[in-house]
Amino acid sequence: MKIRAYHFGEEHQIWQLFYQTIHKVNAANYSQKQIDAWAPNDFDQQFWQEKLAALGTFVCVNSSEFRGNSDKKDSTIFGYSDLQSDGYIDHFFCHHQHQGKGIGNALMVHIHRLAINRGITELSADVSITALDFFKKYGFKIVKSQNVLIRGQILGNYKMRKSL
C-alpha cells in the first residue's frame, strides 16, 4: 500500500468508499436515519470534487500502481484522509471491505509524518462512536462528547486531540 495525493477523476470512487463505509460500518453505532443524513444517496460530483481538493485529500492505494502494473484509473482506493494546516483531520475513512488490514495505520502514520514536517504540534478530529477506539489507540484523548446536527439528524461524536 502507498499513500499519494488524490487525483482528479477519483471523486466517485472516494464517494463510494465514504458512502459504503458509513452505511456498512458506522451503522453499528448509528440509526438508519442518522446514517442516511450523514451519507445521503445523492452524489454531487462538483461539490465532492471541490471538497476533496480543498481538503488536500490523500488516498491509500494498491502498491501495483507504483510498480507500473496498474493504470491509475483502475487503482483501488482502500482509504482516504486529509490534514489541515491547523492539525485538524476532517475525513478519515477506510474501505468497508478492508477494515483491520493496516490501511488506517498507514493513513495515521502518514498524517503524523505530515504534521511533523509541517511543524504542527497538535492533531484534532471530530471522531465517530465507531472510530473512537481506533483514535484512542493512536494517543488521541477525548476533549468532549458532542452532538452535531446533520440534515435534521443529531449524531453523537467526540472532539479529540493529540499533542505531538
Image (cartoon, rainbow, N blue to C red):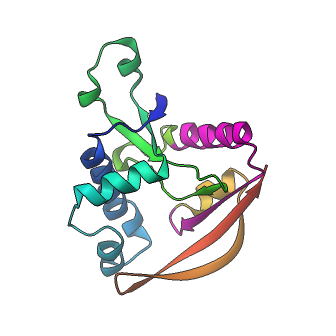
Q: Residue furthest left?
A: 42
Residue 151: quarter of image:
bottom left
Residue 43: quarter of image:
bottom left
Residue 119: quarter of image:
top right
Q: What is the count of numbered marks?
A: 0
Q: Identify the residue at image location x=79%, y=49%.
A: 164
| Percent position of residue 72, x then y | 29, 26
Instruction: From this view, report whether residue 126 is shown above or below residue 120.
Output: below
| Percent position of residue 91, x then y | 48, 56
User: Relative to 46, is 141 on the left or the right?
Assistant: right
| Percent position of residue 139, x then y | 73, 54
| Percent position of residue 130, x then y | 50, 64
Q: Nearer the viewer, residue 57 or 21?
A: 57
Instruction: From this view, report whether residue 67 is shown above or below residue 107.
Output: above
Instruction: From this view, report whether residue 40 is shown above or below residue 148.
Output: above
Q: Identify the residue at image location x=36%, y=18%.
A: 64
148 in the magenta segment: no
Q: Nearer the viewer, residue 105 or 48?
A: 48
User: Relative to 34, is 5 on the left or the right?
Assistant: right
User: Relative to 58, is 89 on the left or the right?
Assistant: right
120 in the magenta segment: yes
Q: Which residues are magenta?
A: 104-130
